[in-house]
Image (cartoon, rainbow, N blue to C red):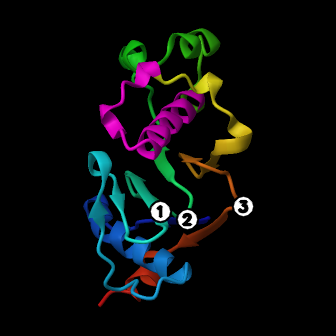
Amino acid sequence: MQTGLLKLISKPYRTSFFSKLLLRVMLKNEGVKNWKTIKIQKGVNDKPYIDGDINFNISHSNNMILCCVDKNNNLGVDIEEIKEVPKDIFDMVFHKNELEYYKNMTQEQFYKIWTLKEAYSKYTSLGLSEDFFKIDTTAFNFDMNVIQWIEEDYICSIYANIKTEMNITRYTESEILKHYD
C-alpha cells in the first residue's frame, strides 16, 4: 500500500490540482505505465477508480492531502485537521455505542471516529450518503482493516479490505510539480 502526504504551502484552493498530481506520482511509484495519461472513471455512487486492479482514494483537509494507492485492495481514506469539535452534530453522526463509549471525548477522539467513519463510507462506496449514526466504529476490527495515525495536527484514517504494510511518503509541492506537464 503506497500512501502519500502533501502539505501545501500555497493556497488551499489548489488542493484539487495537487491531489491529481499526487495521485499521478503515486501511480508512477506503483509501476503504472500510463501514469501521465490515466483516466479516472466513476463507479458505484461515483466512487473514482482506474481501469485495472488499481484502487485509490484521496482526501484533503485545509492544506494537507492524503492519497492512498493499492493494487487489488479496496480502500477508503480520510484526513481531518484537529480543531474545535462541533458538538451539536454528535447525535447525527455517532452511533449510540460510540456516544456511550466516548462520553467525554477529546478533540482527538472525535476526529479519530469521524475520519474512520468517512474512510469506511468511502471504502463501501456510499460516501456521505451513508448515515454516519448507523456506523458503529466500536465494532470495527482495527487489527484487520484500519490504519490510523496523527500527522502534525491531522488525523489520518485508512479503511481497507486487508491491512497491508504501508509505506508513507511525504512530498513537497516542488517534488510534485516536477511531474506536471
Q: Which residue is mark 1?
A: 55
Sequence-wise first label, 3 or 2 = 2
> Looking at numbered disc 2 in the image, what kind of residue is underneath it?
Asp
> Looking at numbered disc 1 in the image, what kind of residue is underneath it?
Asn
Q: Which residue is mark 3?
A: 165
Q: Which residue is mark 2?
A: 70
Q: Residues within 10 Å of mark 2 (few under 14, many from 20)?
A: many
Q: Please say if 38 is above or below 74.
A: below
Numbered disc in front, either 1 or 3: 1
Q: Position of residue 72 (x, y in %)?
A: 55, 63
Residue 160: image tag: none
> Looking at numbered disc 3 in the image, what kind of residue is underneath it?
Glu
Question: What is the span of residues highlighted in magenta in the rendered image?
Answer: 109-134
Q: Position of residue 167 (x, y in %)?
A: 66, 67
**Picture residue at 51% right of the left edge, 54% below the top:** 74
Q: Is residue 28 visible?
A: yes
Query: Gap between marks 1 and 3, in whole Å?
Result: 16 Å
> Which of 50/148 is in front?
50
